[in-house]
Image (cartoon, rainbow, N blue to C red):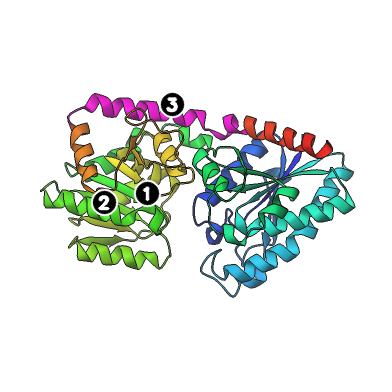
Amino acid sequence: MYDVVLVAFEGPDRYSFVGGLATRMIDLADALVDRGYFVHHVFVGDPKLPAREERAEGRLVLERWSQWISAYHPRDVYDGEDGKWRDFSRTVPAHLADVVIASAAEGRKSVLLFEDWQTADAAIATAAILNVRMPGAAAILWNANNTYGFGSVDFPLLRLAASITTVSRFMRAEMSAVGVDAAVLPNGIAERFLKPLPPTEARPLREAFGDRPTFVKVARFDQDKRWLWAIDAIAFMRDTGARPRLLMRGSRSPYGDIVGARIRARGLSIERVALSTEAATRDLAAAVAASTADIVFLDYFIPERTLRALYQAADGVLANSEKEPFGLVGLEVMASGGLAYVGRTGEDYAVPFGNAVVMQSDDPRELLATHATLGTRPEVIRAIRADGKATAKRFAWPRVLDGYEAAWETAFALTSG
């Protein structure tokens, strides 16, 4: 049994939780602890919280890095990113080497998992320190969740320092295009997503939606997330008299202004709903029922229970990115019993009209056509939802971890060889 060190910018703090990377780190850490590992998670954390925190009876140690910089950049983990990256790259490696050597003194080897471009220099420097201080004490892996920042990564050095992995065949092809060969280790979802929701959770939302076709989109405001396509698709449905509704949740990003401009240009009505983080699903249902807007902007941190109910109750969840490295939201929708509308890139798990709806064109009219077709085939909708749940079970972290452990063994074998 190894000690596992997770190294990423994102983490469990609200300050550090921006997208799928945080979800990956949190749920992976929990799954590792449940399997019996000791886990360190080093991330750029909330400057107001302790620098070190122990959870799970000491089996999970959170280490919040670069807090002195974060204090000057209160928005989120990527506010002041360049300074944090430089500080992280300079100061984390020596600390990680100390963690590895301390574990070795207790008879345990370590696995270091670095995530995305911001940690590449730290991975290279950590490997260099350990090669001098204690060769063979750790297996070092670096994982790419997307292609952001590739121009800042010294891949020739990184290949010497770490085993390189990624999360889908699409991402492997993207990396191959820049001369990097990566092993595919898929993402996972937390087992809690597989637990059925009480019927009382989604029912108020279904009642609030009524007979209006209701879609949900939860994603960062980013061009790759195809927000403009979603807005145009809702506008086209409205123009045909279908009375659609879009419930949307974005992020703090300048691209949100572009999305807002498209909403105004298409003449769609929009209403903002801002509830407390303690609000129940029935509170959201009441707010939606009271709105006649085409678009309801959910401007608050949606609790996971409510989010799952949204996924389940909606006619479809628009998770069809232009370039999707993996498609974590699609899997979470499936696990929740929802109907996932995914894209054509990194969602290796998706089977068109088998366990998901795969959007096959850039034409916004496709949403109406697909929705209308499914409306005449309720048995197909039931089958897609059921097959989606079965697919999600295969991607639960306890199942996926088996492959990770095999990769770690391989990495150690290559190191010793």
In the picture of the structure, the residue carrying the numbered disc 1 is 280
Going from N to C along the chain, the mark reached first, 3 or 2, is 2
Q: Tell me if residue 387 is in the magenta stretch.
A: yes
Element under disc 2: strand
The mark nearer the N terminus, 3 or 1, is 1
Q: Quadrant of the N terminus?
A: top right
Where does the magenta region start and end? 376-401
Vertical placement of residue 223 versus 203, above or below = below
What distance separates the C-alpha of mark 2 from that of mark 1?
Answer: 20 Å
| Label 1 packing within 10 angstroms: few (<14), some (14-19), many (20+) | some
Q: Amino acid at mark 2?
A: Leu
Give the quadrant of residue 53: bottom right
Whether residue 246 is visible here, answered yes or no, is yes
What is the CA distance from the residue labelled 3 to the residue labelled 2?
27 Å
Residue type pointed to by label 3: Ala
Q: Nearer the viewer, mark 3 or mark 1?
A: 3
Q: Quarter-wise, where is residue 342 in the image?
A: top left
Q: Is residue 399 above or below residue 13?
A: above
- The residue located at (22%, 38%) in the rendering is 371
Q: In the image, 150: left or right of 6?
A: left
Q: Which residue is mark 3?
A: 390
Place of residue 241 in the rendered image (x, y in percent of width and height, measured from the top left): 10, 48
State which tag comes first along the sequence, 2 or 1: 2
> Residue 69 at what x, y percent from top left?
64, 72
Residue type, mark 1 in image? Ala
> Is 282 one of the magenta-colored residues?
no
The answer to whether residue 43 of the structure is visible from this angle is no
Residue at the image point whose x is 31% and y is 62% from the top: 259
- According to the picture, the residue beneath numbered tag 2 turns out to be 246
- Looking at the image, residue 146 sits to the left or right of residue 305; the answer is right
Residue 351 % position (x, y): 38, 30
